[in-house]
Every structure is written in structure tokens, then in C-alpha cells.
Amino acid sequence: MKVLIIEDEALSAQALERTLKALRPDWEVAGKTTSIEASLRFLAEHQDLDIIFSDIRLDDGLSFAIFDKVETKAAVVFVTGYDEYALRAFDYNCADYLMKPVQKADLEKALRHCEERFPRLTPSMLKDMSSDILQRKVNYRKRLMLEQGTRTLVTPVEEVSHIAADTGGTKVFLKDGTYGYVGGSLSQLEGELNPEHFTRVNRQFIVALDAIEAFDDLPAKRECALVLKKPYDKAEIHITIPKRKELTGLLY
């Protein structure tokens, strides 16, 4: 089997590849791409893929745009931290829909689906798989354990303004202006926080939707600044224009 991994988080892509090789050592990972544009170029040059593992939210938009522009006979397994795209995914030759963080047992099940090579999902298959996805729904974090020097603070996630990848670890900023450090990477936390309340805006930041104050246009026009509510209103976070459009939809 020849596989393509579409994932804009390097650690997530590496973890998926490691688990895949452990489960199917004879399969070939033909490539890894990180964007819509790079994926389109790769697919134009590689027509012999059997399976595509694809994140949904990429830095330059939703990966559905890839499959809108190119036809592929490969089975597609979507790997994401967001369950709201599940039904839409089945329009794209979807063999399975895995929630991050990906569990080994769930990946094994998805691989079996691909090996059975469903050419087309029937309504009964769609119903069964949708039910299975809902049963696998992530139990999102309600609290974080923040290290503040010699103190460990138990903090409800509702008190979080934003989370940043920092040289000292993963830094959590609270709405009262204080901060602390939490175990786990930004990618891990992305999959553990409810996407109805938190979103990854770029490689460095996860932001609480209710902490967003405004969007400021920048002279370059290729990106804009995300402005947070006080006391973080002076800290501009640069995001892409597609990400701004995505956030605008989430904020409705």
C-alpha cells in the first residue's frame, strides 16, 4: 500500500507515521505534505496512491479543497480534532474519520476499512460509521493543571485566554492576566480542548474564541493581526487571511 500523509503539524505527522509503520511495516509512506497547494502538486505527480491520511484544518484552509480540485481513487482517512466535519467528509471517498489524539486501536480499525477497499459508501455504511464516530467523541478537558513555580494551580478551561508554544514549555495565559505552564505539546492540547470554545490560529497559539476582540488589517495584506481582549490587547497574533475567514465563521 502507498500512503500520503497530509498534516501541517510535524509532530502529529511523525506520530501517525510511526504508528502506521508499527501496524503495517510493509506499507510505504510515499510522501508527507503540509498544505493544500503542496498536496495538489504531490497528487498531480502521484496517481498510484492507495490511501491518504488527511488533517482537515490546514494553515491555508480546509483539506476538502484538495479533493474538490483533484480526483483520486485512493481511500481517504480524515484525521482531525474536530468532529463537526464528519458528515461532510463522507462526500470525499472517506474510509474512516479519526479523532485526535489518534488511538492505536482506532487506526487499526481504519486500516482494515481501507484494506477492504470500500469503493463507495452505502447509506447503511454511512449510518453505521457516523454512529461509531459519535461514540468515539473526545471527552474534552474541563480543567488544566498549571505549574506556577512551586505551586500547581487547578484551572477551569473557561478561565483560559490563550495558550502559546514557549521555549520553557507550553504556556497558558489566563483571563485575569496570570499564566502558568502545562504538560503536553500544543498539538496534544489542540485535540483535548473543545473546538467549540478553542481554536488553533497558527503554529504558536491556541486561542479561546471568547477571548478574541478584533481583527486588524496589516499593510502586507497577506495576513492580519488577531487582537485579544484585555489584558492581552497589546499582544498581536499574526494569522493568515484564510484563517481569519475560518475564525469569522466560528464566531458567528
Image (cartoon, rainbow, N blue to C red):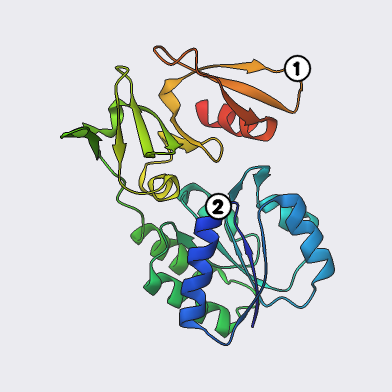
Q: Mark 2 or mark 1: which comes first in sequence?
A: 2
Q: Quadrant of residue 141?
A: top left
Distance between mark 2 and mark 1 Cα atoms = 28 Å
Numbered marks: total: 2
Please give left or right for residue 220 compared with residue 244 in the image. right
Counting from the top left corner in percent of width and height, residue 33 is at: 68, 59
- Please tell me whether residue 228 is drawn above or below residue 14 in the rendered image: above
Reply above or below: 228 against 171. Answer: above
Q: Quadrant of residue 134?
A: bottom left
- Circle 2 sits on which residue? 9
Residue 114 in the figure: left or right of residue 151: right
Q: Which residue lies under the disc numbered 1?
A: 219
The answer to whether residue 190 is seen in the rendering is: yes
Residue neighbourhood size for the residue with mark 2, other residues' Cα within 10 Å, grouped as few (<14), some (14–19), many (≥20): some
Q: Residue at 79% x, 72% y: name it.
A: 46
Q: Amino acid at mark 2?
A: Glu
* Residue 56 drawn at (x, y percent): 58, 52
| Along the viewing direction, whichever of 1 and 203 lies nearer the viewer | 203
Q: Residue at x 65, y 52 (%)?
A: 63
For image coordinates 43% across by 56% down, the residue present is: 100
Q: Residues within 10 Å of mark 1 (few under 14, many from 20)?
A: few
Q: Measured from the top left, where is residue 48 in percent x and y? A: 76, 78
Residue that protrudes farthest toward the left in the picture: 151
Figure check: 37 above or below 251: below
Q: Identify which residue, 80 or 117, lies in the foreground.
A: 80
Secondary structure found at label 2: loop
Q: Residue furthest right?
A: 45
Query: Is 40 or 234 nearer to us in this picture?
Result: 234
User: At x 38% / y 67%, what residue is drawn?
Assistant: 103
Q: Quadrant of the N terminus?
A: bottom right
Q: Is residue 19 above or below residue 32?
A: below
The reply, left or right, for residue 216 in relation to residue 21 is: right
